[in-house]
């Protein structure tokens, strides 16, 4: 693989590197960066559907927004199939684990509303069947645009391909609830280009998804973060000195880590409305460290850019590891350089006794972190599990300079608004 300088030139910026040395500092079970144990007797939001990635309605500055006193979240959602013969095992029992593991292939965008920032009521599907151009509606961001209630939903249209798209609709409230209307015309925005961002042709396991648009608090322009992999044929990437970082003797061997090539992508809008986008070089790369930096998002605090992204144990490269959870990086300006929070990047990981208890964390500007419950062990050995598919308890972290600390835990799926918009 070409070096960053050869590949991206001198402008506009050099991607920051999450190095193997940084990742060697990741320590599971540090109480300041570990999510409290989720109890196996958690309540579920719905017996009809699984939910996972949760996307609170917000404005372009990142503020979680309620409308006319109603909080709104969007979720990736799939039907549960307790009576479908396809998911009944040889003993006649519902194989919920298999049903849950198959969910990505039938993911659809649903919305929920609440007066309390929890106890969510199911609103329904955002787009009618047939509106979205592909089989899967994957993660993104709903943006409240104005006091008329216009909403741009940015999301990922997946299979075939993976395209960042958006669809415009409107939120309508009554004293009884919320509905989403419109959402009828999906506009493709962009796909991986093979020069900066890896394509499916270069790697069938590529990732290109999870748009997170925002207005830069400093230059006022409209940008978008997304998940990608660094361009190039699978196996061609080089894990050199820069990617390794400053490691102790005995840690120079990078094994097969060239297959792990995650990056956080960024694009800038050419227009005010965000209909026309130009991809820029990644903000952050993790070549030789990790293969997935999913759902990247920002918290703007104390004049700094706090960049958060979720990742898995199974996507780490040879010789480095860490828990499933949310990782973070901080910079003084949008284009970096970014340094890993807490030295390692780890901000909130699952405890090693319950490695899959939660995932898809979203750090909100008020320090609250929402996530979903994946599976929680129900016996000592961890062989019996209970599948979640529902909201996890919300955790609060304090962000201080280059460090973060877990400081509180709240109710399941607690996502309070930061501002309320009265619709005109
Ligand atoms: C995170 C994620 C996203 C993707 C979705 C697919 O949990 O992997 O990156 O959009 O889930 O279900």
Image: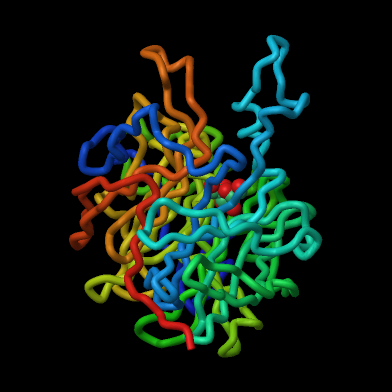
Q: What residue sits 47% from the left and 48% below the top?
A: 360
Outermost residue, top side: 91
Q: Quadrant of residue 418?
A: bottom left
| Colour pattern of the rendering | rainbow
Q: Position of residue 132 (x, y in %)?
A: 75, 63
> Looking at the image, how many numbered discs can be counted on the residues?
0
Q: Quadrant of residue 355?
A: top left
Q: Position of residue 97 (x, y in %)?
A: 60, 27
Front-lying residue, 111 or 103: 111
Front-lying residue, 296 or 175: 175
Q: Is residue 131 left or right of residue 403?
A: right
Q: Is residue 392 left or right of residue 236?
A: left
Q: Position of residue 43 (x, y in %)?
A: 42, 36
Q: Is residue 69 left or right of residue 187?
A: left
| Location of residue 37 with respect to 272 vertically, above or below | above
Q: Position of residue 119 (x, y in %)?
A: 41, 51
Q: What residue sits 68% from the left and 72% below the top?
A: 183
Front-lying residue, 232 or 402: 402
| Location of residue 185 with respect to 412 vertically, above or below | below
Q: What residue sits 65% from the left and 82% below the top?
A: 275
Residue 344 seen:
no
Front-lying residue, 304 or 157: 157
Dividing the image into 4 quarters, which one contains the N terminus? Answer: bottom right
Outermost residue, front side: 175
Q: What residue sits 53% from the left and 81% below the top?
A: 149
Residue 355 seen:
yes
């Amino acid at each position: 693989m070409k070096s960053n300088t050869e590949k991206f030139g001198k402008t506009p910026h050099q991607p920051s590197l999450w190095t193997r040395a940084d990742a060697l500092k990741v320590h599971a079970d540090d109480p300041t960066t570990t999510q409290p144990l989720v109890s196996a007797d958690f309540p579920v939001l719905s017996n009809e559907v699984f939910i996972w990635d949760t996307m609170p309605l917000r404005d372009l500055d990142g503020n979680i927004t309620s409308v006319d006193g109603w909080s709104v979240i969007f979720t990736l959602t799939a039907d549960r199939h307790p009576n479908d013969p396809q998911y009944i095992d040889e003993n006649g029992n519902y194989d919920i684990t298999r049903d849950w593991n198959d969910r990505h292939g039938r993911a659809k965008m649903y919305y929920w509303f609440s007066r309390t920032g929890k106890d969510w009521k199911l609103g329904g599907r955002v787009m009618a069947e047939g509106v979205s151009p592909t089989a899967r509606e994957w993660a993104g961001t709903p943006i409240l645009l104005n006091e008329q209630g216009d909403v741009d939903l940015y999301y990922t249209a997946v299979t075939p391909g993976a395209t960042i798209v958006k669809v415009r609709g409107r939120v309508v409230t009554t004293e009884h609830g919320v509905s989403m209307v419109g959402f009828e015309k999906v506009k493709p925005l962009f796909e991986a280009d093979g020069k900066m961002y890896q394509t499916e042709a270069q790697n069938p396991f590529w990732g290109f998804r999870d748009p997170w648009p925002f207005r830069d608090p400093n230059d006022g322009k409209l940008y978008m973060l997304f998940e990608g992999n660094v361009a190039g044929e699978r196996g061609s990437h080089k894990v050199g000195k820069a990617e390794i970082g400053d490691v102790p003797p005995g840690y120079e061997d990078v094994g097969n880590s060239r297959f792990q090539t995650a990056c956080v992508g960024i694009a800038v809008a050419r227009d005010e409305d965000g209909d026309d986008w130009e991809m820029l070089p990644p903000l952050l790369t993790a070549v030789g460290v990790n293969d997935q930096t999913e759902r990247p998002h920002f918290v703007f605090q104390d004049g700094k850019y706090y960049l958060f992204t979720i990742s898995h144990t199974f996507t780490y490269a040879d010789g480095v590891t860490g828990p499933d959870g949310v990782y973070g990086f901080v910079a003084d300006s949008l284009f970096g350089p970014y340094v890993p929070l807490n030295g390692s990047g780890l901000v909130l990981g699952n405890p090693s006794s319950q490695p899959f208890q939660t995932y898809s964390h979203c750090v909100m500007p008020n320090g609250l972190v929402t996530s979903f419950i994946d599976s929680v062990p129900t016996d000592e050995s961890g062989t019996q599990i209970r599948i979640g598919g529902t909201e996890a308890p919300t955790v609060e972290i304090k962000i201080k300079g280059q460090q973060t600390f877990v400081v509180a835990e709240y109710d399941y799926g607690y996502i309070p608004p930061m501002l309320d918009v009265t619709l005109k």
